[in-house]
Amino acid sequence: MGREDRDTRTTRRDLFRGGATIVALSTLVAGCSDRRTRSHSVHPDEDTPPPTDPALVKYREKARLPITVPEPRGIAWDGASSVWVVGNGEMQRSPIEGPSPVAETIRYDGPGACVAFDHKRLLVGVEGKVLEVPTSSWLPRVWLDAGPDAVITCIAVGKDAIYLADAGHRRIVRCTLDGKIRGYLCEKDEKRGYGGLIVPSPHLDVCVDAEGAVHVANPGSHRIEIYDPDGAPRWSWGEESQDMPGFCGCCNPTDFALLPDGRYVTAEKGIPRIKIYSPEGHFECVVAGPERLSPGVVGVDVAVLANGVIAALDRGIGAVRLFARSEGG
């Protein structure tokens, strides 16, 4: 087919998926690649990040859960004994301890990017759709379709609503529990001087805390924003910096989760590292620096398990790393 016969329009989803026309914003910052490979090499002299101060590291790796999912992208805890890992065409349940339970692998069509669990079902983001997988049948079905240009990268289940991070439209979608769209958060608002979310690559995360507040990563602005359940803004925190307390590169944090006491677990790319911040956004400690993660790994999804154990998807080694607080940490 000749060039004149093709539709040359390039959607935002095409850019995220590596289409023919790519605005490579990440190449402006060293080590900020978003290619969907498991990892990329890091030059030992030019790109090796400085070593992490051991005094800042307050966690240790206690175990690894091997996974076989093709191109794993997201993880979620089932609230009991297992971690679900979602990837290209399938997801699997990885038991934290003991023998594997039934329904170990579930297959579907498309590249899965994220997963959430609410004790009755799994919700899986596959491009612009959300699949529902009831625990009673384990049969995937379309729960919501956010449109052809949507890219669902995170799902957060609240008490009265479900929030979807749509990196394609750079916004958060607020839905009812049965999959009806009720509104949007984080859209550009000139009246209050808000420029909207800056999402140069397919990394956009959202969490809901115990009181229903919605926490959203604004990766291009290097901060986390907090909203009321209906989308009214509260406050934000975070700054761009090469120093450990800040977020560096083109777009960080890529992923984050909330501990039961309201503290944040954040993950970054470029310089792969996982950190802990207070509920007010003050840096506290390091879970894992680049020395404890695969070199150059892009997108380390994180989840909080029982007793504050932190699960981190390290695609470079094809495993979920489990980190526990060190003695005296």
Image: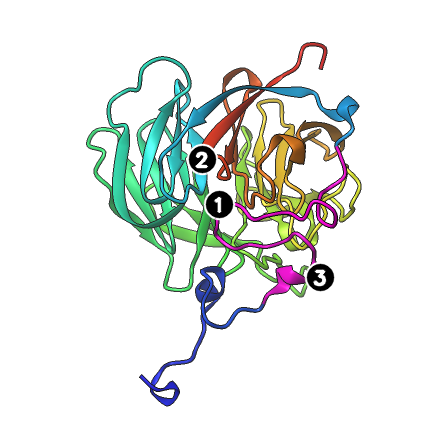
Do the CB atoms of the residues marked 2 and 1 lie less than 8 Å apart? yes
Between discs 2 and 1, the one toward the N terminus: 1
Question: Picture coordinates of residue 69 (x, y %)?
Answer: 36, 38
Q: In the rendering, at what x and y percent does residue 99 appear?
A: 31, 15
Cα–Cα span, label 1 and label 3: 38 Å
Marks 3 and 2, how far apart at CA: 43 Å
Q: Residue furthest top?
A: 327
Per the rendering, the mark at residue 193 is 3
Image mark for residue 110: none
Q: Nearer the viewer, residue 316 or 133?
A: 316
Near mark 1 (Cα within 10 A), the count class, few <14, some 14-19 or many ≥20, is some
The CA distance from mark 2 to mark 1 is 8 Å
Give the quarter of the figure containing the C terminus: top right
The residue tagged with tag 2: helix, strand or loop? loop
What amino acid is at disc 1? Arg
Q: Nearer the viewer, residue 6 or 262?
A: 6
Residue 47 included in the magenta stretch of the image: yes
Q: Residue at x 74, y 50 (%)?
A: 46
Q: Secondary structure at mark 1?
A: loop
Q: Which residue is mark 1?
A: 38
Alpha-carbon neighbours of circle 3 within 10 Å: few (<14), some, or many (≥20)? few
Q: Position of residue 23 (x, y in %)?
A: 57, 69
The boundaries of the magenta stretch are 24-51
| Residue 201 lies in the magenta-colored region | no
Is residue 106 found left or right of 264 in the rendered image?
A: left
Q: Which residue bears the numbered disc 2?
A: 318
Number of marks in the image?
A: 3
